Image (cartoon, helix red, strand yellow):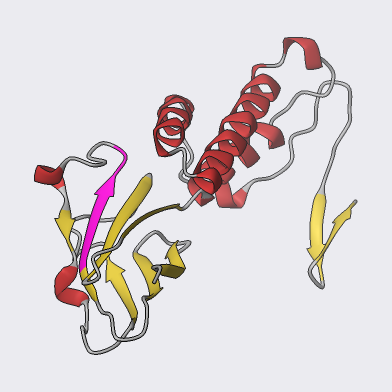
Amino acid sequence: MAITVKTFTVSNDMLTISVDVEVGAGQVVSEFLLWNEATYKDPAKAIDISSLLAGTGNTEIFTITAAQAGLTKFTGLYFAQITSNDPLTAIVATASLTQYYNIQAALVANVDLSCLNCNDNLNNALLLDLYITGLQGSLIVGRFQDAISFLSKIKILNTNAECDTCSELSPVVSSAGNIVSVGVIDCILTVV
């Protein structure tokens, strides 16, 4: 039987990871190891989360807190190696990209529409979008080393951005007098 991972997701506040795993009938999940992008597949640096397993059935549903993993927040990529007593093993990955979308929003909000050819914010926003898309695609197809590489490039942009207030962005009026605003009304994106 296979290991089916129904949920392995970092919360938007990056404080928890939700897990929902199912193994074949009569089997149990016997081990759950966690890595980040810097420690991926290093057995000596794996965080053993197996103590959170109930071990009473073929389904495991639990939440990992950042504190349980010895962290303050789940920033970056996180990989789990899930092993059943069959023994089968599956490796899955997750990441909260909210922090990077906030940076992208800040860059786009400050695009000077009067000079698109000479605009660092536009170029950085486009580059960041390419890396985020590449990271997502790599995770979907299981190319975890590529995802790690893309994240390292994203972090370069992240270290150059001061973004404590990215969630409180206001549009910037360019020197050409253009202003672009968007809003969400009843879950439908609208352009004003």
Measured from the top left, where is residue 139 in percent x and y? 50, 45
Q: For the point 48% across and 26% down, which residue is it?
A: 157
Q: Is residue 117 left or right of residue 120?
A: right
- Please say if 26 is above or below 14: below
- Please say if 68 is above or below 111: below
Q: For the point 32% across and 39% down, which residue is it?
A: 37
Q: Which residues make up the magenta segment?
A: 31-37
**Observer-nearest residue: 45 or 159?**
45
Single out the residue that lies furthest toward the top.
Answer: 118
Measured from the top left, where is residue 34 in percent x and y? 25, 55
Measured from the top left, where is residue 17 in percent x and y? 36, 65
Residue 10 in sight:
no
User: Magenta region's main secondary structure?
Assistant: strand
Residue 127 in sight:
yes
Residue 36 is one of the magenta-drawn residues: yes
Q: For the point 17% across and 40% down, which residue is it?
A: 42
Q: For the point 57% across and 37% down, which residue is it?
A: 132
Q: Is residue 6 left or right of residue 167?
A: left
**Observer-nearest residue: 66 or 169?**
66
Measured from the top left, where is residue 79 in percent x and y? 33, 51
Residue 48 is one of the magenta-drawn residues: no
- The answer to which image quadrant residue 1 occupies is bottom left
Q: Is residue 143 left or right of residue 172?
A: left
